[in-house]
Image: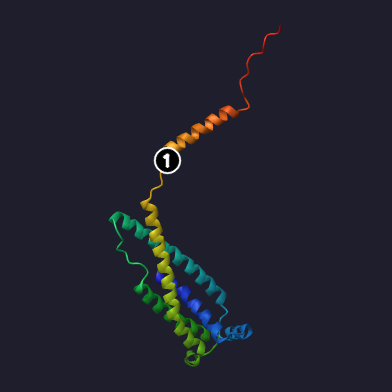
Amino acid sequence: MVPALAAVAGVVVAHAVDYVVVFPQADQRAAQLHATGHAYWPIAAGAAAAAAAVAVMLAAGRGTHRAGGASRAGGASRTPGVGASGLGWSLALQLGAFAVMETGERAMVGLPPSVLLHSATFWLGIALQLPIAWLATRVLGAVEEVTFRLVRHLRRRPVRPPRRLFLRTWLDAVATAATWSPIRSRAPPAPSA
């Protein structure tokens, strides 16, 4: 699940970087995006942001789960993290998604898929998938590992309320309130002479 979500985010990031590199001028890039069927782009960007957020949460959840297994096992958990297999899946999914996305974009504006063979954006986009997939895998792996270490550290040091300190603080508060209280008992009035 994490590699698939990373791939959704990664393919959109690589696609955006691709078009920024090939068309550095904003107006030229906007014209090219319009001409090549990118009307759906805001939806793709939103889906990528959501997929990235869920992938980060799932990676943190995996780290927490690993820490729970490590504390029960008395050592490091045997559950593999987001690693080389995650990179392989993310890369394969990103490459496939990018090719389908580019083909679909051209089909939306009536261009044949063969135009991609002569497109700089297509070939650069293909080349960008590996570094983007690698970076996403590294970031998610780091999130998982940091969460694992943090949870493991917090579980080693249980937080217990110090009873004596609580009792002492409570007694001090009661004593202070009793001496400060505006309602004080008065002595009876002195007899008149």
Instruction: From the top left corner, tell me how far across and down residue 41 is, in percent.
Output: 55, 77
Q: Quadrant of the C terminus?
A: top right
Q: Is residue 12 above or below residue 64?
A: below
Q: Which of 115 and 140 is in front in this view?
A: 140
- What is the secondary structure assignment of the residue under circle 1? loop
Q: Is disc 1 surrounded by few (<14), some (14 to 19) or many (20+) residues within 10 Å?
A: few
Q: How is the rendered protein coloured?
A: rainbow
Q: Which of 105 and 125 is in front in this view?
A: 125
Q: In this view, does 119 lie above or below 8?
A: below
Asked whether, in this view, residue 84 is left or right of residue 167, the answer is left
Asked whether, in this view, residue 179 is left or right of residue 14, the answer is right
Instruction: From the top left corner, tell me how far across and down residue 162 is, in percent.
Output: 42, 40
Q: In this view, does 166 lie above or below 63?
A: above
Q: Given the current orientation, which residue lies at the most extreme left position?
A: 73
Instruction: From the top left corner, tell me how far across and down residue 47 is, in percent.
Output: 51, 71
Q: Which residue is drawn at 55% across and 31% down?
A: 176
- The residue at which mark 1 appears reads as 162
Q: Nearer the viewer, residue 20 or 98?
A: 20
What number of labels is visible?
Answer: 1
Q: Which residue is drawn at 48% across and 86% down?
A: 124
Q: Quadrant of residue 133 in the image?
A: bottom left
Residue 4, can we see it? Answer: no
Residue 152, can we see it? Answer: yes
Q: Given the current orientation, which residue lies at the most extreme front position?
A: 193
Q: Which residue is drawn at 49% across and 34% down?
A: 170
Q: Residue at x 40, y 75 (%)?
A: 90
Q: Quadrant of residue 32 in the image?
A: bottom right
